[in-house]
Image (cartoon, rainbow, N blue to C red):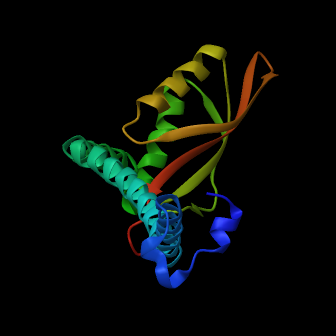
Amino acid sequence: MNINDLNSLDLNEIGEWPLPAKLAVVLVVVALVLGGVYWFVTRDQLVVLKTEENTEVRLKSEFEAKQAKVVNLDKYEQQIEEMKQSFGAMLRQLPNKTEVAGLLVDVSQTGLGAGLEFELFQPQSEISREFYAELPIRIEVTGDYHEFGDFVSGLAALPRIVTLHDVEIAPKGKGLAMRATAKTYRYLDEGGK
């Protein structure tokens, strides 16, 4: 079949065309139909499919993360219970307002019991924090090295939290002088008092 044969083909007599020409027409029609189906139907569905695949990956990740949490839920609940108990124990170490005066006496008695001589014991204004308040106490004491050690150990042994800050130790006479800020803390109730 040559070009002259192609020019002589009549569309009205397509049934009488040679086999290669019929196959070529069928291939062109099939290609056009497939192209049309892709262009008008499949192309949009592929975009939707890609979006859904991305959603599937995201949801699968979320599911795995949630499943890992659920698997460990009992452990998390146990940890929360332990933290509540621990937090309660810590809160019990913070005096309430009525116990602060007794704690101040305990701090001064600890110093006197260690053999220190108080030159200054001055509670400062209370400083409110998020759920607790700090009560700083400026202290100046004199004594020797071992008495300071006994005092600090005694403070650490108190049933309430007392910390020392801004500690300065300097020679004074035959002994030493210590300036520090002792801070004790109290729990603020839900009213912030």
Where is residue 181? Give x, y as percent: 66, 43
Q: Which quadrant is home to the N terminus?
A: bottom right
Where is residue 150? Give x, y as percent: 52, 21
Camera-nearest residue between 164 and 72: 72
Query: In the image, is residue 151 above or below residue 97?
Result: above
Where is residue 118? Give x, y as percent: 63, 36
Camera-nearest residue between 97 and 4: 4
Whether residue 147 is visible: yes
Q: Which quadrant is home to the C terminus?
A: bottom left
Which residue is the extreme one toward the bottom?
A: 12
* Picture residue at 59% right of the left edge, 14% below the top: 146
Query: In the image, is residue 74 above or below residue 60?
Result: above
Where is residue 168? Give x, y as percent: 76, 31
* Picture residue at 54% right of the left edge, 27% below the top: 152
**Left-right relation of 116 to 55:** right
Q: Quadrant of residue 4?
A: bottom right
